[in-house]
Image: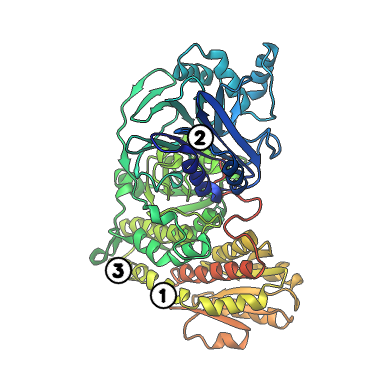
Amino acid sequence: MCGIVGYIGNKHAVPILLEGLHRLEYRGYDSAGIAVIERGELCRVRMPGKVNSLVAQLAERPFESTIGMGHTRWATHGKPSEANAHPHANGDETIMVVHNGIIENYQTLREQLSARGYRFSSETDTEVVAHLIEDEYTGDLTQAVKRALRKVTGTYGLVVMHAQHPREMVAARRGSPMVLGVGDHEMLLASDVAAFLRLTDRVVYLEDDDIVTLRADEYVIDTLADKHVEREAERIEWQADEVELNGFRHYMLKEIHEQPDTITNALRGRLIASEGIAHLGGLDKVLNHLKEAQHLVIVSCGTSYYAGLYARYVFERLTDLVVEVEIASEMRYRKTNIRPGTVVLGISQSGETADTIAAMHEASRKGALLLGLVNVVGSTMSRITEAGVYNHGGPEIGVASTKIFTSQCAILVMIALLLGRFKHLAVTDGMEIVAGLERLPTHISTVLKQADAIRSIAASYAQYDNFLFLGRKYNYPMALEGALKLKEISYIHAEGCAAGEMKHGFIAMIDQRFPTVCLATKDMTYDKVLSNMQEIKSRGGKMIAIATEGDEEIAEVADDIIYTPPNLDFLQPIPAVVALQLFAYYCAIERDCDIDQPRNLAKSVTVE
Ligand code: F6R
């Protein structure tokens, strides 16, 4: 969703801001803008559309400035237009603001300010902040921002510049991510480190109610309550080249191919083969609670929700926990069984998904122990949870989640293994699971080697407008995920279905123009899935099967087959879903879709 970048230092600000905005494009946006201070004046350029249009305009008017901020906007209040694009200014354009989040009381503030003569030029909630700061300004920018924000309810990550303060900028955070990059005689700000990773890997994560004043050589952190905070910069583990395409045509393809590494990174140092157990350092401090726990609620959205659905089967197999999986945005409407002692595990790549965070806050009010499985270090979810596990998957730039989904699945198996081994799970079973997990990177590589074959299969199916994805048990969440991937990036209608449900309705759709992708790896449900496939075949439906190597029987029913190596039944679906990711990717290529920036989608959904 919206992205922020800020710069103050000794270099030309504009190229740094534009590069930062390009790096944030993957998050989804519909307008972009920048502001700099040039010879004592705040100058801004903003417009609906892509960052490249901004680049073109700035090429005609190159600003000379070493301080500036930029923004990509994903419209919430008001349509995408120049007037609604950020930065927003006060009346005489001496103060400018970029903002992510939502000012909930903006109508009231707007009415109060209008009554006092302030004139508004946009439909946005953000503009009130610029006028409020003007209203509070008596010469000290930081104090004015603080006083203004004390009147605001809602969420924000924001940056403020003032024409009379060409050597400082002020940023604040509440509920919307903001990270400070500390360079050599330069400071950077961003809503996402990807924006400035090429310039520095030393970062300070802002916390809620922090107000930071930046100058080229220093940062001073204060809180809204006027408390000074000392916080040292830390080194981020992500490398600059992880946000490059490195020869791949799209980030999605690059990330699909990274999966042998992301799984290796997820497992690294966390498996003890000789004891058949996992060790997850991030859970150490709650281990006693987890050993006693009886009830686990997993909460997440989208692809992360499907990882949760997969985990339910695995937890039920390896532990004696009662497991529920909730769609975060639905959880609040249900009278859930959460009570003191319930363990609530939030799963989120970004760690910033508003629905998941809201559901977790609600669970915490009911006394749950909050855990997180998160990829982005320092994200909001990693802060609100008692303990948790990081994916260590590196930045995921492609809007459609791929590498973090499989990493989530592998880590969830490790958590189930850890908890299972405290109860009835035998060491020998644990050892088998460890060995099975360790085989995953090679098994995924085996699927990746079939990319060309999957591409040809995709080429012969991409003209269809509807698909059914079928799977049972462990493969059912993968069917849902395969359908979601296809929908998101190729805009082909696809439905995921529990194979047993097919004859209760879905089968009515099947004909020669309605193909099915069947996850039919060898497990206890295999024979039943095969019968479902027969039913489809007898109705003339075309079929692609994802099957276990050596399965020749499947060739009698499926038109096309992608094989994955044999493994424990609950681990085979992980490489199988990689085949579905490639299938979706190549269908989208055939249809010439904008794969890394699919229409209407945002990478990190920070509004409910
Ligand atoms: C689909 C996808 C989304 C996300 C969902 C949750 O490819 O990426 O469905 O999974 O928006 O995002 P996170 O995991 O960041 O909470």
Residue 391 visible in this rendered orientation of the protein: no
**Residue type, mark 1 in image:** Asn
Image marks 2 and 3: residues in contact by CB distance under 8 Å: no
Q: What residue is shown with label 3?
A: 431
Which residue is more in the foreground, 564 or 230? 230
> x, y (%) of residue 257?
45, 67
Q: What residue is shown with label 1?
A: 567
Residue 69's label in the rendered image is 2
- Could you tell me which quadrant the N terminus lies in? top right
> x, y (%) of residue 364?
47, 36
> x, y (%) of residue 212?
41, 27
Q: Residue at x 38, y 46 (%)?
A: 388
Which residue is more in the foreground, 185 or 257? 185
Which residue is more in the foreground, 464 or 147? 147
Mark pair 1, 3: CA separation: 13 Å
Q: Secondary structure at mark 1?
A: loop
Quadrant position of residue 129? top right
Q: Secondary structure at mark 3?
A: helix
Which residue is more in the foreground, 20 or 470? 20
